[in-house]
Image: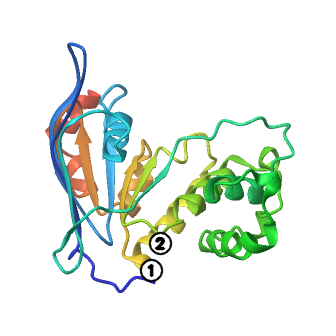
Amino acid sequence: MKHNQSKLCETKIEHFGVKVGELTIFEDVNFTIHCGELTALIGPNGAGKSTLLKSILGEVKHTGKLNYFDAKGEHLRPIIGYVPQTLKFDATSPTTVLDLFMACLTRRPVWLCSSKFIRPRVTENLRRVKAEHLIDRRLGALSGGELQRILLALALDPLPDLLLLDEPISGVDKVGMRIFYELVAELKAAEDMAILLISHDLEMLERFADTVILLNKRVLKIGTAQEVFSSDEMREVFKTK
C-alpha cells in the first residue's frame, strides 16, 4: 500500500491540444490532478473528453505536456491505468476472467502458460475490487457491472499513479453503478491514487467527486461539483434554466 501523502503528488496537464486536419478537438487544456482525489470530467458529446484521456495515455498525438511529481517533488514518468467504456469480445467464447488476465499480464500465449503461477496474482488483483469469486467465470457470463470491475482490477496491475476511467459505468444499472463508485472511492483513499473519470451521472459525481472539470473543446469551469453544476457555464453548455 502506498503511504498516504494526499495532494503532495500531482499530475499537471499543461496546454494540451488535439487537431485532426483543420478540426480542433480541444485546445489549451490545463488542470492538475492531485493524488488521493477523484477528478471528474464532464461535458457534452463531442467536447473532446475521451480524446483527452487517450492523449494523456499517449495514444493520440497532441500538443502540450504531462508533468507528474511524486510526494517528494521528483519529476517522474507516471504509471497510468486505464478502464475503457467497454470490452469488445465474443460473448460465446469460453474465455474466463483468469484467461483475460493471463493474456494481458504475460507475453506468452495463454495456452502455453501455467495458471498456477499467475492465479495468486490475479486473485489479489480481483480482491481489490471485491471480485475474486469471478476468477473462473466466463467473460460472456458477467453482468455489465461485473465486467467493469474486472477491467478495473486489470488496470490496477501494476498499481498506477494515475487511473483514467472513460465512462466505465455506461450501461450499468444503479446498483452496479453505486458499487463501482464505492470501490473507486476506497481505492482513492487506500492507495492515495489520482483518478480522472469521465461520467454523465451528475448525482454520483456530486457524492463522490472532489473536483469537477467542465470541458467543451476547452476548460470552461473547474471547482467542486456544486460550484460547477450551479455555474453559468454549465447552464450555457447544457442550456438549462
The residue positioned 39% from the left and 51% from the top of the image is 197
On the image, which quarter does residue 3 sit in?
bottom left
Q: Nearer the viewer, residue 124 or 233?
A: 124
For the residues labelled 2 and 1, the Cα–Cα distance comes to 5 Å
State if disc 1 and disc 2 touch (CB < 8 Å).
Answer: yes
On the image, which quarter does residue 80 sit in?
bottom left
What amino acid is at disc 1? Ala
Q: Is residue 95 left or right of residue 81?
A: right
On the image, which quarter does residue 221 sit in?
top left
* Disc 1 target residue: 190
The residue positioned 66% from the left and 69% from the top of the image is 126
- Residue 10, compared with residue 206, is above or below; it is below
* Disc 2 target residue: 187
Give the position of the C terminus as an image quadrant: top left
What amino acid is at disc 2? Leu
Colour scheme of the picture: rainbow
Number of labels in the image equals: 2
The residue positioned 54% from the left and 67% from the top of the image is 183
